[in-house]
Image (tube, helix red, strand yellow):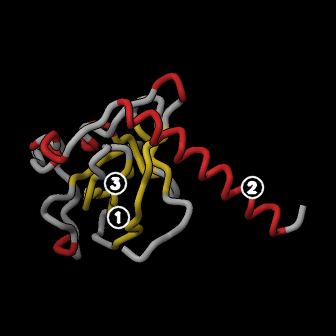
């Protein structure tokens, strides 16, 4: 298969996923007024993150998620009104920005779920996507934009 066909197939897959999610979320129409205050309140007493040089580069709104001895700082920069995608910055334990991108919540078709409280939902960052504790994950945007 040549590259042009591969690109067309990738575009069709991404478009289909976005269409399915948008149709599902139109049913659950939400407004900006429904953004819960808990998205903006961070409780750092749950786990004491590493205190290393350079962590002053991590936003005060970021939260630490530890998994299997490793961990990352996550900062929710923006959540879409429909609560199906967000711009998230991910830092390593030393404060180095690993990625800042738009992530879309992907769930099985019979288990559509909205983004609710990412601090409680995130399990770990696998270097590509953000794995969630339920049957969903946050897919890194197919087309990288300047954020």
Residue at 74% x, 61% y: name it: 8
Of 84 and 26, nearer the camera is 26
Reading the image, the residue beneath label 1 is 92
Residue at 40% x, 69% y: name it: 98
What quarter of the picture does the N terminus occupy?
bottom right
Label 2 environment density (alpha carbons within 10 Å; few <14, some 14–19, many ≥20): few
Of 123 and 14, nearer the camera is 14
Indicate the quadrant where residue 58 lies.
bottom left
Disc 2 on helix, strand or loop?
helix
The location of residue 136, given as percent across then percent down, is: 46, 35
Q: Quick one: label 3 or label 2, which is nearer the N terminus?
A: 2
Indicate the quadrant where residue 133 lies.
top left
Disc 1 on helix, strand or loop?
loop
Q: Which mark is residue 111?
A: none
Reading the image, the residue beneath label 2 is 9
What quarter of the picture does the C terminus occupy?
bottom left
Residue at 15% x, 39% y: name it: 34
Of 144 and 32, nearer the camera is 32
Residue at 50% x, 58% y: name it: 127
Of 44 and 32, nearer the camera is 32
Reading the image, the residue beneath label 3 is 86
The location of residue 20, given as percent across then percent down, is: 53, 38
Q: CA distance from mark 3 to mark 1?
A: 19 Å
Q: Quick one: label 3 or label 1, which is nearer the N terminus?
A: 3
Q: CA distance from mark 1 to mark 2?
A: 34 Å
Vertical relation: 25 (above or below) 125: above
Answer with left or right where residue 34 lies relative to residue 147: left
Label 3 environment density (alpha carbons within 10 Å; few <14, some 14–19, many ≥20): many
Tell me, yes or no, whether the two marked residues, 3 and 1, touch with CB atoms within 8 Å. Answer: no
Vertical relation: 121 (above or below) 73: above
């Amino acid at each position: 298969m040549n590259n042009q066909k591969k690109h067309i197939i990738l575009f069709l897959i991404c478009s289909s996923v976005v269409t399915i999610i948008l149709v599902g979320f139109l049913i659950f129409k939400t407004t900006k007024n429904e953004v819960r205050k808990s998205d903006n309140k961070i409780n750092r007493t749950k786990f004491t993150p590493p205190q290393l040089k350079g962590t002053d580069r991590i936003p005060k709104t970021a939260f630490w998620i530890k998994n299997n001895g490793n961990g990352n700082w996550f900062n929710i920069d923006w959540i879409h009104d429909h609560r199906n995608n967000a711009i998230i910055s991910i830092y390593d334990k030393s404060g180095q920005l690993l990625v800042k991108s738009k992530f879309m919540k992907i769930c099985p078709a019979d288990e559509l779920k909205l983004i609710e409280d990412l601090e409680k939902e995130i399990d770990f960052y696998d270097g590509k996507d953000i794995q969630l504790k339920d049957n969903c994950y946050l897919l890194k945007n197919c087309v990288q934009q300047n954020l």
